[in-house]
Amino acid sequence: MEQKASTPISGDIEASHEPGAPILRSSSDQIKEPIRSSQDASDFQDGENHVIYIVGVRFWLIIASLAMSLFLTNLEIPIVTTSLVAITNDFGRFDNVGWIISSYLLGYVGVLVIFAKLSDIFGRKLMLSLSISIFILFSAGCGASQSLTQLIILRAFQGVGGAGCFALASVMLTELVPPEKLAQYVANLSTVYAISLLCGPIIGGAISSRSTWRWVFLLNIPAAAPALIFAIFALPKNFPHHGQLDRPRRTFKTLIAKETTQKVDLMGAGLLLLATLSMTAGFEEADSQFPWKSAYVISLLTISGILWISLVLWERYITNHSKTVEPVLPWRFMQDRAMLSLLLNAVFLGGPWFVAIFQLPQKFQLVHGSSGLRAGIQTMPFTFAAPIGSAFSSMMASKLKIPAIFIVLVSGVLQTIGFALLASLPESSHIPPRTYGYQVIAGFGCGINISTLLLIVPFVVEYRDKAVGMAAVSQLRVMGGAIVLAIATSVFNSYTRPKLAQFLESGHLAGESIPSVQSLAQFSVQDQESIKGILAHGYNLQMWVLCAFAIAQIPSALLLWRKKQIMV
């Protein structure tokens, strides 16, 4: 069969005429032996297009851009947690302070899939550059905010930029390296992701204590600028179709042409955005600002349910009947048992992962009397174990060729054991040394699935759905985290509020639903131990909630079962 010719780019490419069989080319165009993969052609690309891999300096500049943008945008999730007191002291308001975190998450979770789909239509380079630019611009706006309301609004748009960076980093990685190296680089990217969540509280606490809280946002300007520069100058214009003579180069005229814009699924994107925002906001506000049975919460969740049903019906229609519009969430995902497994596991993983990151440091501060910085350090066994788990799972998948289903099952079992053990800790102010071992088990289990779920996507979906598939897994993981955080908080409040009623009446905790370290100091030693015991039991109940969602990952993983197992 005759093969298509490929065009070298500055001598720094690897070209593949068959998926999984990249042919190395040097500047002299000398062909070396192809590197074979164990996978079929359909796993990696549409049957007609050959793949060209960038190597050399340009490759590492692009990797640096993706790593920096991923690190900074995910750093913004936890970095604010240790700066909230300084922010509220500056603005003189504590009402709606939770929206400083929630608004970023809402902007973040609402557009992950949308950015991925737009990058399919308008190109990876344009959408990555736009995402980083949005993140930098609104980071500057957050740092210059003159009111709490301004900060909350600007944080939402900052989250939009962060979502684009995360979605594009995940997708582009699969297009930068050959399939046999994908597991290694996905593990590396997952490590960057986990380290950003580890460093956030520590960096935020250090900045707030030594300087103004505004640098929590302003530091993104000089830090993200190199990522933007590398994206603009290192990425080929038509990436990942650069060097392919049968692919027209994207220009401003082609980007705004009717043939391009009519591909955008505006209805699907709008339904997905509104469904995600209404569901996440409903769970965020439940038992926080409004009771679960309030009209506000019920209305949001009802509207969200209607929007999700409408989205599914619309995407089914577009997938089956439209020849021009590209569905933002293809109906093919609903018909694929393996893809459904990945999406369900992403939701169930998001809860244990995000809730543990937010709640473990809080427990160390309120129950065990640790400072914010010390609490961040005491949570490090959990956050450090996660990237190790990611690297371990990638090795099992790529080197040992262990089927994906068994790796995902091991993750669910380890999470179940780890969170069950954390839920069984003594309800006192003393920290048993075994606490840190339990964190390692739970964190290691979470880390396995953080990388594995993304790693499997290209081997499950069609080539055209790869970007949307990876973004959907990421979006549902964050959405699952927001939903389970609301559920865990509700369980905590339902137990602690009645038990703390007698102390609330004393006046020391007036206006506080959860006592602060400062207010606890006003009580006698005996009362402090009683309050800490109540809080400790509340946190243990939260760990049981996380254990339940860890268990849910086990049956959902079984949907991956095939006669010929999925292997990387």
Image (cartoon, grey):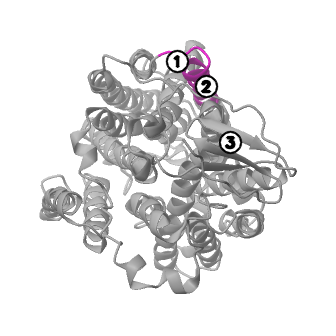
Residue sitting at x 66%, y 54%: 5
Which percent across, then down, holds residue 497? 28, 42
Which percent across, then down, holds residue 532? 44, 31
526, 382: nearer the viewer: 382
Q: Are marks 2 and 3 in contact (CB under 8 Å)?
A: no
Which percent across, then down, holds residue 305? 15, 56
- Where disc 2 sits, the SS reads helix
- In the rendered view, does 438 fall on the left or right side of 309? right
Q: Which residue is mark 2?
A: 385
Disc nearer the start of the sequence (3/1): 3
Residue sitting at x 46%, y 40%: 458
Q: Could you classify mark 1 by the number of other residues whose Cα lies within 10 Å: few (under 14), some (14-19), or many (20 or more)?
A: many
Q: Which residues are magenta?
A: 384-402
Question: Eyeballing the image, is 67 above or below 266?
Answer: above
Determine which quarter of the picture holds residue 243: bottom right
Q: What amino acid type should be assigned to the residue bearing mark 3?
A: Leu
Q: Are marks 1 and 2 in contact (CB under 8 Å)?
A: yes
Q: Which residue is mark 3?
A: 373
Confirm whether the magenta stretch covers residue 243. no
Q: Could you classify mark 2 by the number of other residues whose Cα lies within 10 Å: few (under 14), some (14-19), or many (20 or more)?
A: many
Q: What amino acid type should be assigned to the residue bearing mark 1?
A: Ile
